[in-house]
């Protein structure tokens, strides 16, 4: 396969893609990418941009991650094309010059699943580092991967022969590879893992009577085709070595786990102008407030100025009375529908934010059980324990919040 954009995952309404680093970047000046997409119009569509229905739509021109997920994909029976390049001023809008973009490595469009295919997928496997198992390769580690048995409650259960397991190095250049064609159990240990980027795993049931499937189809889909059941969503990345921070403070491991797989281990700061390491952001912080909100939500736009005043008052009081006051940090977890909405809204906020294009954002929204916004969850900055599931509707009073931190 050529070097270019590869498919990481897909469901019935979204596609996750990844691409190799383009150009050079540093810790102080990360490369920004312009990512675009469009539906494929026919079986002969080669992904080129020639205007009209073949014109690409910009997803973002300020991405720093080399992985992105496009949601709300519907109505394209021929799949979708993506392309990416280093962002420039002229690429803040759709750029018709396709020569500067990197396209699909497989030279074919990526496809979403049907609703029926999605309903048959297994849950993502759970992958963890097994520190009790020795690995023969120096400086390597062992991953323990387990999954829930496949059960439909119907006749298909009797046709189950085993499980096919695949793994992928969490590197933008590397696709999926098969670990085992048909495992009889629901767990396995993968030894001699060495990548500093870590690994992810996915699994599917192997059924008696499978026909029409081929692994080459996995370049463009999470299903091998025919009557084969698609692969599960990928596990969380396991084994990734994080960049070291200069912070001398400490923060809860449980708290940091909530932000697992955050790109470069950094949050946005100062309205998106700067970035800060997670461990620096939460060092010596007593209370962490997760703020789920969106610019399209009128109650959110009314609540945000109140929270800004509370946050600024808390900062001032802590600065003048560090022995009496409690340190407070707020993190914006956006529920916006697009990057522009996120950027415009976050520009009005003085605190930190999870990058809009990071999967961590959606995982946090799910973990917080957000069904409506605004929502303000209060965590103990030392332990990560939930102190109040939603403070919206309650007094933004420093004394009340200080009592939570005792």
Image (cartoon, rainbow, N blue to C red):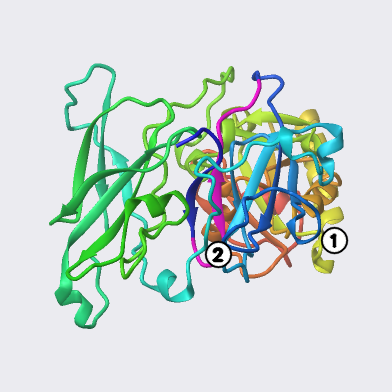
Nearest the eye: 245 or 282: 245
Q: Is residue 319 magenta?
A: no
Which stretch appears magenta? 11-23
For the image, the number of numbered tags is 2
The structure residue drawn at horizontal position 19% and vertical position 75%, both measured from the top left corner, is 157
Q: Which element carries disc 1, helix, strand or loop?
A: helix
Residue 301: assigned label = 1
Q: Which mark is residue 369?
A: 2
Q: As displayed, is residue 64 above or below residue 181?
A: above
Q: Residues within 10 Å of mark 2 (few under 14, many from 20)?
A: few
Q: Residues within 10 Å of mark 1 (few under 14, many from 20)?
A: some
Q: Quadrant of residue 294?
A: bottom right
Predominant secondary structure, magenta span: loop
From the viewer's perspective, is residue 190 above or below residue 378?
above
Q: Residue at x 80, y 62 (%)?
A: 300
Where residue 239 appears, as percent x and y from the top left, is 37, 32
Q: Nearer the viewer, residue 77 or 385?
A: 77
Quarter-of-image position of residue 321: top right
Query: Helix or strand or loop: what does disc 2 sit on?
Result: loop
Tag on residue 289? none
Measure the C-alpha gap from mark 1 to mark 2: 21 Å
Point out the residue furthest to the front here.
44
Q: Nearer the viewer, residue 232 or 95?
A: 95
């Amino acid at each position: 396969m050529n070097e270019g954009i590869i498919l990481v995952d897909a469901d019935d309404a979204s596609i996750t893609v990844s691409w190799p680093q383009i150009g050079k970047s540093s810790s102080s000046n990360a490369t920004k990418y312009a990512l675009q997409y469009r539906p494929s119009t026919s079986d002969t569509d080669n992904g080129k941009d020639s205007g009209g229905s073949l014109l690409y739509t910009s997803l973002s021109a300020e991405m720093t991650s080399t992985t992105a997920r496009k949601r709300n994909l519907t109505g394209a029976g021929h799949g979708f094309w993506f392309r990416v390049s280093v962002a420039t001023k002229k690429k803040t809008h759709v750029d018709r010059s396709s020569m500067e973009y990197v396209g699909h490595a497989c030279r074919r469009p990526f496809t979403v699943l049907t609703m029926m295919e999605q309903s048959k997928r297994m849950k993502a496997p759970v992958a963890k580092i097994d520190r009790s198992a020795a690995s023969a390769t120096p400086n390597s580690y062992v991953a323990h991967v387990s999954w829930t048995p496949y059960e439909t409650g119907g006749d298909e259960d009797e046709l189950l022969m085993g499980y096919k397991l695949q793994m992928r190095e969490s590197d933008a250049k590397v696709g999926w590879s098969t670990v085992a064609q048909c495992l009889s159990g629901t767990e396995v240990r993968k030894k001699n893992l060495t990548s500093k980027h870590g690994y992810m795993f996915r699994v599917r049931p192997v059924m008696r009577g499978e026909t029409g499937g081929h692994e080459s189809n996995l370049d463009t889909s999470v299903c091998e085709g025919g009557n084969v059941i698609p692969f599960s969503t990928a596990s969380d990345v396991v084994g990734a070595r994080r960049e070291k921070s200069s912070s001398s403070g400490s923060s809860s491991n449980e708290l940091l786990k909530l932000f697992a797989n955050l790109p470069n281990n950094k949050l946005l700061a100062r309205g998106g102008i700067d970035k800060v390491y997670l461990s620096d952001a939460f060092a010596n912080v007593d209370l962490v407030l997760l703020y789920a909100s969106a610019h399209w939500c009128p109650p959110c736009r009314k609540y945000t100025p109140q929270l800004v005043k509370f946050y600024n008052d808390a900062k001032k009081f802590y600065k003048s009375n560090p022995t009496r006051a409690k340190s407070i940090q707020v993190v914006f977890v956006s529920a916006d529908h697009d990057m522009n909405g996120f950027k415009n809204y976050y520009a009005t906020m003085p605190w930190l934010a999870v990058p809009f294009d990071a999967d961590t954002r959606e995982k946090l929204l799910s973990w917080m059980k957000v069904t409506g916004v605004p929502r303000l969850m209060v965590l103990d900055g030392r332990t990560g324990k939930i102190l109040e599931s939603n403070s919206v509707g309650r007094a933004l009073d420093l004394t009340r919040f200080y009592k939570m931190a005792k």
